[in-house]
Image: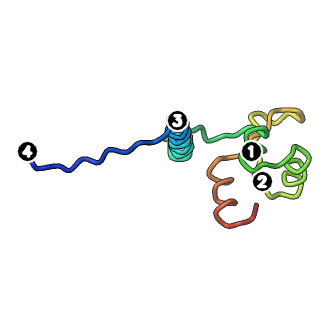
C-alpha cells in the first residue's frame, strides 16, 4: 500500500451541508442532461420550462415555425410535442 497523505479540514456544519446540497444539485442536473432515459417528445410545458419562456412565447414560436411540432394524431386539437433533438439543435445554434 502506498503512503497516502491525509488532510483534515474543519468546516462549519452548515457550510458543509450547503456544499453537499450544491454538489448534489449539480450532479442531478448533469445526470438529467446526459441521461439516456430522456424521452424524445416534449410537451409544451416541458419546452417552456427548459427555455424559461411562457406559453404565449411558445405558441408564437410554434406558429412562426421555430419549433417543429409533432402531433400524435391529425385532429385539430390533438396534443402537440416538440422533439428533444430539434430543441437541443436550436439551443446549440443560438436560435432560441
**3D distance between C-alphas at marks 4 and 3:** 32 Å
Residue at the image position 79 percent from the left and 40 percent from the top: 44
Residue at the image position 64 percent from the left and 63 percent from the top: 92
Foreground pick, 67 / 91:
91
Residue 51 at x, y = what percent?
A: 75, 50
**3D distance between C-alphas at marks 3 and 1:** 32 Å
**How dense is the environment of label 3, judged by Cα within 10 Å: few (below 14), some, or many (20 and up)?**
few
Q: In the image, 4: left or right of 40?
A: left
Residues at circles 1 and 4 in contact by the CB criterion of under 8 Å:
no
Q: Secondary structure at mark 4?
A: loop
Q: Secondary structure at mark 2?
A: loop
Residue ID for mark 4: 1
In this view of the protein, can residue 87 be seen by the observer? yes
Residue 10 at x, y = what percent?
A: 41, 42
**3D distance between C-alphas at marks 2 and 4:** 58 Å
**How dense is the environment of label 2, judged by Cα within 10 Å: few (below 14), some, or many (20 and up)?**
some
In this view of the protein, can residue 32 be seen by the observer? no
Residue ID for mark 3: 17
Residues at circles 2 and 1 in contact by the CB criterion of under 8 Å:
yes
Which-is-in-front pick, marks 3 and 2? 3
Residue ID for mark 1: 47
Task: Indicate the quadrant containing the N terminus: top left, top right, bottom left or bottom right.
Answer: top left
Residue ID for mark 2: 67
Amino acid at each position: 500500500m502506498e503512503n497516502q497523505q491525509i488532510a483534515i479540514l474543519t468546516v462549519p456544519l452548515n457550510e458543509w451541508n450547503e456544499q453537499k446540497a450544491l454538489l448534489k444539485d449539480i450532479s442531478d442536473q448533469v445526470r438529467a442532461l446526459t441521461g439516456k432515459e430522456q424521452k424524445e417528445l416534449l410537451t409544451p410545458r416541458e419546452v417552456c420550462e427548459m427555455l424559461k419562456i411562457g406559453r404565449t412565447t411558445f405558441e408564437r414560436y410554434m406558429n412562426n415555425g421555430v419549433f417543429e411540432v409533432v402531433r400524435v394524431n391529425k385532429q385539430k386539437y390533438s396534443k402537440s410535442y416538440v422533439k428533444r433533438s430539434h430543441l437541443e439543435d436550436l439551443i446549440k445554434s443560438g436560435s432560441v
